Image: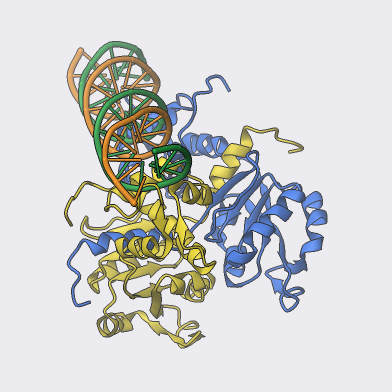
Chain colours: A blue, B yellow, C orange, D green
DNA sequence: TAGATTGTTAATCGATTAACAATC
DNA sequence: TAGATTGTTAATCGATTAACAATC
């Protein structure tokens, strides 16, 4: 890296959204795009788009704009998506099943290569071409498939223990779907996907509008 | 409301997390808590906790801290969760199924009272005690159950059309699980839950660490 | 060339943190 | 009272926006 200015997480989040928008433009045969068009497409300001990109280099041509395919590839590369990522998941309930079959992951270069559960009624079941395995099988799968990221899709009460076990197995990053703040070492990357927080932002905002017939 | 200082969305997000943490403390029989303990529990600073609460009033006692049950109720009330919310959902695929059976929603006072799909192979199927209905049934269900919020769990290509239809049916807020920025009128509250953005933040961060054996 | 759009700097805005008086 | 912790103000930090020179 030439310049290592600290990149805001909000910028990385938007980059992910830009890159998906660029993929869509590319699929639709669009070859050139301006910061203003990207901004309109994803709902931010043109200055924001240019500022975000400026953290990583100069990708456009003044007076012209950006080449869609090039910028798409740059953004993917920045996000680390110019390669394939294997994942393991713990929790073979309905959410785990949905995540395993979620096309959005594959489209971005992610593959879930192992699903684990400690529930004997779930072990052995198949999800797509995967068999649900007991927790003890995790180390082997991780080694075989060079996995660095784990997904937690268990009930809340199991999440912390599962996270600890994942780290013991060598995971470097965790995506947690359980609505519980995990306590983990600093060197582990963790992000939470909370399914109901956004819903509560909606109810908060609706609360200030006419309550209709409550 | 006495004072109407604009509340940052980050504050509302944390409030949702505090309130769940307080519910947990309450279940565990804890009756009193300080801003520092809440901060430790959810991973923010004590000043942050106090500042967030200060937008809405004075809930603690100097020198003592907060009463868990009281603060829990206050936070729930602020979020609009002192009442029950009925929801409708479009999309009866794996994700829709997982969301319908997700306990986390019920625990916060949400009920999905209608699931819709335009896929004839899905219509008529049962999810818990709900039957998947054709889109045309949405207006009636919404009227019968006083629904104001809709969830989109469809494939990406259908999301915009579904959102437009929901608004036509009178929805005031939308929780969108499709990875696509929706274009909607300003008076509609929309929030996106993007299942892979957080994953890409992880790969971005891992990209700066030793790439191991790529 | 004239018009358009980038890359970047400076200005603004907003959120977080630190500090401390108030007070239990 | 002494110790603890809130509520709140001021200071700091960081992110967004505006503006414009560079340049295609």
Q: In the rendered view of the protein, which quadrant contains the C terminus of chain A? A: bottom left
In screen coordinates, is B133 left or right of A47? right
When asked about the image quadrant of residue A203, the answer is: bottom left
- Looking at the image, can residue A42 be seen? no
Q: How many marks?
A: 0
Q: Which residue is at a point 40% across and 84% down the rendered structure image?
A: B133
Question: Which sits in the foreground, A152 or A179?
Answer: A179
Question: Which sits in the foreground, C1 or A143?
Answer: A143
Question: Which sits in the foreground, A147 or B64?
Answer: B64
Q: Which residue is at a point 73% across and 38% down the rendered structure image?
A: B214
Height in image: A196 above or below B33? below
When asked about the image quadrant of residue B187, the answer is: bottom left
In the image, residue A175 lies at what x, y percent? Answer: 59, 53
Q: Which residue is at a point 43% across and 61% down the rendered structure image?
A: B68
In the image, residue A47 lies at what x, y percent? Answer: 31, 31
Question: Which sits in the foreground, A100 or B20?
Answer: B20
Q: In the rendered view of the protein, which quadrant contains the N terminus of chain A? A: top right
Height in image: A171 above or below A207? above
In the image, residue B122 lies at what x, y percent? Answer: 49, 82
- Looking at the image, can residue B73 be seen? yes
Height in image: A81 above or below A156? above
């Amino acid at each position: 890296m030439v310049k290592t200015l600290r990149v805001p997480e909000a910028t990385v989040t938007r980059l992910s959204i830009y890159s998906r928008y660029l993929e869509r433009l590319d699929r639709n045969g669009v070859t050139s795009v301006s910061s203003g068009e990207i901004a309109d497409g994803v709902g931010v300001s043109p200055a924001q788009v240019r500022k975000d990109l400026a953290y990583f280099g100069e990708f456009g041509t003044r007076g012209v704009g950006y080449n869609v395919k090039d910028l798409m590839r740059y953004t993917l590369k920045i996000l680390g998506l110019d390669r394939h990522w294997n994942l393991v998941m713990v929790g073979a309930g309905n959410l785990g099943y949905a995540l395993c079959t979620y096309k959005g992951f594959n489209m971005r270069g992610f593959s879930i290569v192992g699903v684990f559960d400690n529930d004997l009624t779930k072990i052995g079941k198949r999800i797509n071409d995967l068999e649900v395995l007991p927790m003890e099988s995790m180390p082997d799968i991780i080694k075989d498939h060079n996995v660095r990221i784990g997904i937690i899709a268990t009930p809340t009460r199991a999440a912390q223990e599962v996270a600890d076990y994942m780290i013991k197995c060598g995971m470097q990053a965790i995506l947690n779907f359980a609505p519980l703040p995990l306590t983990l070492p600093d060197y582990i990357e963790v992000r939470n996907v909370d399914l109901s927080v956004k819903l509560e932002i909606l109810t908060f905002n609706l609360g200030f509008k006419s309550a209709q017939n409550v």
